[in-house]
Image (cartoon, helix red, strand yellow):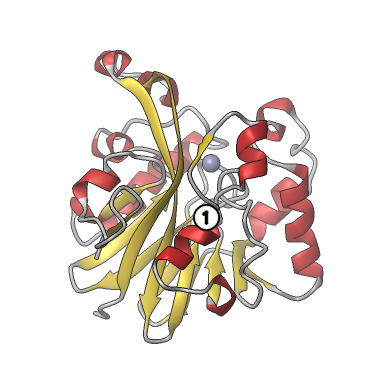
Amino acid sequence: MHDHQVFAVKFGEVKAGSQAQHFLNPPPELHEQPGHLDFAVWLVRTVFGDIVVDAGFTSTVAAKRNRTHFREPSEGIRLLGVEPADVSHLLLTHFHYDHVGDVGPFTTARIVVQEREMTFWTGRFAARAEFRRLVETEDIQRLVALGLAGRVDYVDGDREIVPGVRVHRVGGHTPGTQIVSVESAKGTVVLASDSAHLQYHVTHDCPAKLLTDLPEMYAAFDTIRALAGSPELVVPGHDPATFERFPAVPGLDDIAVRIA
Ligand SMILES: [Zn+2]
C-alpha cells in the first residue's frame, strides 16, 4: 500500500431547490434538505509526480451558467503549492462542463480519458437536448485538439497511472465516466466524481437523476464499495459534507481539505 496524499479543493457552489432534485426517485426526507452542491477538483501527491483529477470550470462559464465561483480550479491547485504546468497527469472523470473547463494551465500533463467518453461527445447523441445542455462546445473542441496534438491517453476500462493510483471505467453517469482509486496511509481512497454526486447515493444505493445507463450506475456503486478501504474514504463528486468531514489544510479554511 502506497502512502499517497489526497486533497479536495473547492472552487464553486450552487444552492437552489432541495437535495431531492439530484435523485432519480427522491427519498421523501431529501425534499426537506436545502439543495447544495459544491464544485471541486482533487489533487493526488505522489513520489512519482503530482496528479490532478478533473479541471472544473472557469469564471467565464460560471457567469454564463449562473454558478457561484470562488477561484479558477487551477488557482486552487496552486494554493496547495503545486504549479499546474508541473502536474504529470490530469485525469478527467467525464466531459460535463463542470469537470473539464480549466484544462489550459496544465500545459505538460498527460490527459487521461476513457475512449468511450470521447466517442460519445463527438458522436451521434451528443447534440440531443438532455446531453447537450451538460457540455460546453469549447471544452469538447479543446479536448479533440489535445487528442490530435498527442496529449491524450485513451483508456478502455482500468489502468494504473502510477503505482497505487488507478482509473476505473464505471459508466452510468456518462458512457465513459471513470473513478480514481488512490492507495493512502488511511487505506484506498475512491474519488467517485459524478458516479456519486452525494454520499447518500452510495450509502442508500439510490441512483442520481443524471445518467445514461441505470444498471451501470448501480454497478458503479458496487465498484466504489469494493475498492474503498472504508465507507469514509469514498469521496463523492459534489457533496458539501466532504469539506466538513475532512480537516482543512492549514491556512486554507473553506478552500481545501486533506482526505488522506
Ligand atoms: Zn457530471
Q: Nearer the viewer, residue 53 or 202?
A: 53
Relative to 61, is 13 on the left or the right? left
- Residue 93 in the image: x percent, y percent? 53, 55
At horizontal 27% and vertical 57% (from top left) the residue drawn is 226
Q: Is the residue 252 above or below the residue 155 in the image?
A: above
Q: Is mark 1 within 8 Å of ligand 1?
A: no
Check disc 1 and give the amino acid type.
Answer: Pro
Residue 67 in sight from this viewpoint = yes
> From the image, which quarter does the C terminus lie in?
bottom left
Residue 54 in sight from this viewpoint = no
Relative to 42, is 119 on the left or the right? right
At horizontal 65% and vertical 40% (from top left) the residue drawn is 61
Q: Secondary structure at mark 1?
A: helix
Q: Is the residue 211 above or below the residue 151 in the image?
A: above
Relative to 80, is 68 on the left or the right? right
> From the image, which quarter does the N terminus lie in?
bottom left
- Residue 126 in the image: x percent, y percent? 74, 39
- Residue 142 in the image: x percent, y percent? 76, 58
Q: Nearer the viewer, residue 223 or 254?
A: 254
- Residue 253 in the image: x percent, y percent? 28, 52
Please give the residue where the numbered disc 1 appears in the rendered image: 73
Mark 1 neighbour density, 10 Å: few (under 14) some (14–19) many (20 or more): many
In this figure, what is the number of numbered marks? 1
At horizontal 39% and vertical 82% (from top left) the residue drawn is 163
